[in-house]
Image: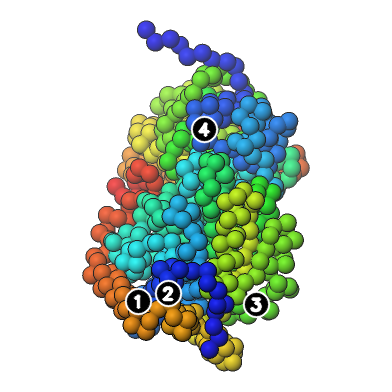
Amino acid sequence: MIAPTTEALLDREASERMYELMLTTKLADDQAREETKAGRLQAAFYPVRGLEAVCAALGEVLRPDDQLVSTYRNLGDALAKGVSLRAIMAELYGRIDGVSKGKGGAMHLHDTAVGFMTTTGIVGSGLPIALGLGLGAQLDGSDRAVVVTFGDGATSIGAAHEALNLAVLWRLPILFLCQNNQWGEHTPIAEYAGSTDLRARVEAYGMPAHRVDGFDLFATLRCLRDAVASLRAGRGPVFVEAMTYRLTGHTGTADFSYVPADELAAAMARDPAPVFRSWLVESGTLTQGEADEVEHRAEQAVADAFAFAQASPLPGPAELWTDVFATDVVTWEER
Amino acid sequence: MLAEPKTEEMTSAVAMNSALDCAMAADPKVILLGEDIADPIGGVFKVSKGLSTKYGAHRVRATPISEQAIVGTAIGLSLAGYRPVAEIMFFDFITVAMDQIVNHATKLRYMSGGATPAPITVRTTVGGSRFGAQHAQSLEAWFMHTPGIKVVMPSNPVDAKGLLTSCIFDDDPCLFIEHLNLAYSSKAEVPVDDLRMPLGKANVLTAGGDVTLITYGATVPLVRAAAETLAGQGISAEIIDLRTLMPLDLDTVFESVSKTRRAVVVHEATQFMGPGAEIGAQIHEQLFGELLGPVLRVGARFTPVPFSPGLSNAPSTERILTAVHSLLDQP
Ligand SMILES: Cc1ncc(C[n+]2csc(CCOP(=O)(O)OP(=O)(O)O)c2C)c(N)n1
């Protein structure tokens, strides 16, 4: 077993909290993929398996008033920020109790009450939007942090580079968190990037940039905590490249055979939630029984959320026309 | 007794500056973003002249040449409770920021079930082929074709001020298109204080009984000139300046066309697949039995905007007159 950095950064409650979040994320992800494979869930679901530790660490360092912009691969980010699992699942199924009344779908989650501002299905386009949230925080004189998460592939998009440059120029309080899972759909990073050292690329913009082992919960936690403290202190944006691996296919149903078996096996051996459980028990932080209890709670929460989602009604036909504009606009199509 | 509002003679460019000034004074949440918009230059078209000096560089923010970042920043600011106004120097450059506008700003309200609207204003300029085909095209149909964004194009200084102010305080994303031929030429008496006009209300410029000429923006003066010629020939034209393309004030259009029973739509955007196609189709669908002839269109030819003064793809007064006469000659 490869243990996380054994550092006493955490009290028992925080450890338990993070383990529960990682496990809930993993179980909900597993279940969503099963549902898509069975054809019961007709949605493009983008699994987050492999990102659990990064998401748990992020959730631990952020305050409710901090703001996050995420992507289509958003389940872990959303749970970390405190979005209701029931509402997320209902959205996946296109139900009225979803975060967007079913009109957004899996790729478009949000809950501004907990600072989960928006998510995008367009690779790399969250970074410019984060600029505005960061500028808002700066203009408000608030010390709230803004985080934008994105994959490694997003660093090939022009919008990302515009955003990194402008964030440095204006010293905006933004954490650019690259969840580097080594793959952009079917393409490994070395086949799409001239330099795979994303951290070094970003450093060239004049922004502090760090690379951290995203399977190592404590290392990631320490890195993100420092980054966010730096933002809050007004020292401008920070880039963090969290190195993980995609433990599933690109989507819930995608072919996965192209991933080299040895790479995947090595990554699977570091699967964040089970590894953390072993550490919790071995280090004496939790007893076996206590760890089982956390597991039981996570299982219950996931079962409850899926049942809730499946029982929620579909939106009525009138919902088609609402929320297009602030007040209804007649186009004569409807008359 | 109500006092007359204080007015001053202004070009459209000055009127828009006045709109921004009044909006910034009224609401500290109004933030301007764009390339070169801060003083001393105050924007390459001078529309934001003086504002960074008056309100500070934290509210009038000169940006790098980063159209995606400009619009993205505006969207993020709107999510944070601000009312940003982003300037895209030329309409053509909006293609660079298309993702942020049509995939994000226009859809955030819908995709979030109403929770995260992005009430931004994007100002841009159009017209004049002094710079060639990459600085001149009229792309309003692209945005009218996209649910979730309002599209506004004023034809005179008063409308420019009133409509721009309304865009800034509107709860939807708005695209505000300024025609360079109109920005500096004609002047009008414009109220100096806060002025707002409803979006989605067309303006009947002249009343007439024989034909309805439906237009907006830079072709308004052309249509006026055509109408004067027609008047000399004993033909009375009713001119509608749409002012807002989305929402499109079809009520006013239908009311006029059911009276005149003839209609010509005139615009500077390419005629083929242009705004006139939808307006014409709507009139046909609603008023088919009442029409004395088909709805005709006069728009730009289906070419890039040519540079040489010897070439023009734009509608002309002659083409408008030809269209009207062919309608009146219908058996
Ligand atoms: C602009 C754009 N191009 C292409 C796609 C299709 N697409 C969706 S996810 C993806 C891979 C992105 O890879 P990466 O940024 O590394 O994120 P990951 O999916 O690995 O988390 C692609 C190409 C898209 N959604 N947006």
Q: Quadrant of residue A262?
A: bottom right
Is there CB contact under 8 Å for labels 2 and 1? yes
Dot 3 or dot 2: first in sequence order is 2
Which residue type carries mark 2?
A: Tyr
Disc number placed over residue A189 in the picture, else none: 3
Asked whether the viewer can see residue A31, the reply is no
Is there CB contact under 8 Å for labels 4 and 1? no
Can marks 4 and 1 be said to lie on one chain? no
Can marks 1 and 3 be said to lie on one chain? yes
Q: Chain of mark 2?
A: A
Dot 2 or dot 1: first in sequence order is 2
Q: Is mark 3 within 8 Å of ligand 1?
A: yes
Alpha carbon distance from label 3 to label 2: 29 Å
Tag in front: 4 or 2? 2
- Residue B282, given in percent of the width and then of the height, sits at 39, 46
Q: Secondary structure at mark 4?
A: loop
- Residue B223, given in percent of the width and then of the height, sits at 55, 31
Tag in front: 1 or 3? 1
- Residue A115, given in percent of the width and then of the height, sits at 44, 54
Which residue type carries mark 1?
A: Val
The residue drawn where x is 57% and y is 51% is: A232
Alpha carbon distance from label 4 to label 2: 44 Å
Alpha carbon distance from label 4 to label 1: 48 Å
